[in-house]
Image (spheres, rainbow, N blue to C red):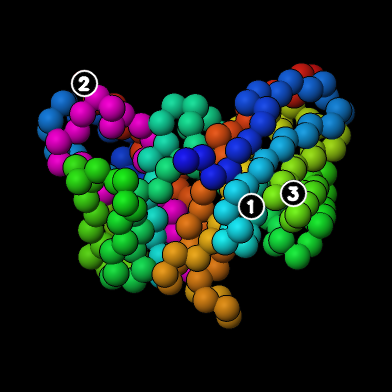
Amino acid sequence: QQQVKQSPQSLIVQKGGISIINCAYENTAFDYFPWYQQFPGKGPALLIAIRPDVSEKKEGRFTISFNKSAKQFSLHIMDSQPGDSATYFCAASKSIGSARQLTFGSGTQLTVLP
Amino acid sequence: DAMVIQNPRYQVTQFGKPVTLSCSQTLNHNVMYWYQQKSSQAPKLLFHYYDKDFNNEADTPDNFQSRRPNTSFCFLDIRSPGLGDAAMYLCATSGRGLAGINNEQFFGPGTRLTVL
């Protein structure tokens, strides 16, 4: 059962454009929603994250929009740059005993054309 | 720099030949996680350690085992690798904050396993 659905699978934007990636979740036990950026041959790196009591969070060119009632959240990358070309994973986190469990979306391969 | 280190970065093994992957951390984090990431897929949690307590995901095959001899090191053992076990294996850690274990997980660079 895929608990976090992510779209689109791939995205091509021009330099300076806006990249938008969408995710939806099912389990209301999730209480933290991070986005990870992964370059080829590297591990995922935390980009930005949001809690469900906040509707929007902005860090530089990256913004998360969160809709708790719809159980949806999205990543907006403003002024996209070729260096942003990577795979982006949304994720949802919940407690598992004394630790935290991350459930990832299926990923979006972003290509920013120069 | 505090970090999560994985060795080796690339590992080639033969079908059925046991293999061990290594993870070490200088973050002094309580929790260490192992994920499997197949090509063009999302990372999938295999198991985690909270200190010395081992927690297996329900769908992790018995072929996968783990050891954590101390806070800094954690090992992933694949007893009899099959062709379907070829993947990137990611180690991650998270530490304790004021409200319990922090949400953020710090990932290592991964070990790419090839099974011949």
Chain letter for mark 1: A
Q: Quadrant of the C terminus of chain B?
A: top left
Q: Nearer the viewer, mark 1 or mark 3?
A: 3
Please indicate, yes or no, whether residue B1 appears anywhere in the rendered image. no
Q: Amino acid at mark 3?
A: Ala
Image-quadrant location for residue A8 = top right
Q: Position of residue B24 (x, y in %)?
A: 35, 57
Task: Provide the residue designation for mark 3.
Answer: A70
Query: Which of A74/B24 is in front?
Result: A74
B1 relative position to B115: left or right = right
| Residues rendered magenta in the picture | B76-95
Task: Provide the residue designation for mark 1.
Answer: A34
Label 3: which secondary element: loop
Label 2 environment density (alpha carbons within 10 Å; few <14, some 14–19, many ≥20): few
Label 1: which secondary element: strand
Q: Amino acid at mark 2?
A: Leu
Task: Provide the residue designation for mark 2.
Answer: B116
Q: Is residue B14 magenta?
A: no
B44 relative position to B77: left or right = right
Outermost residue, bottom direction? Answer: B98
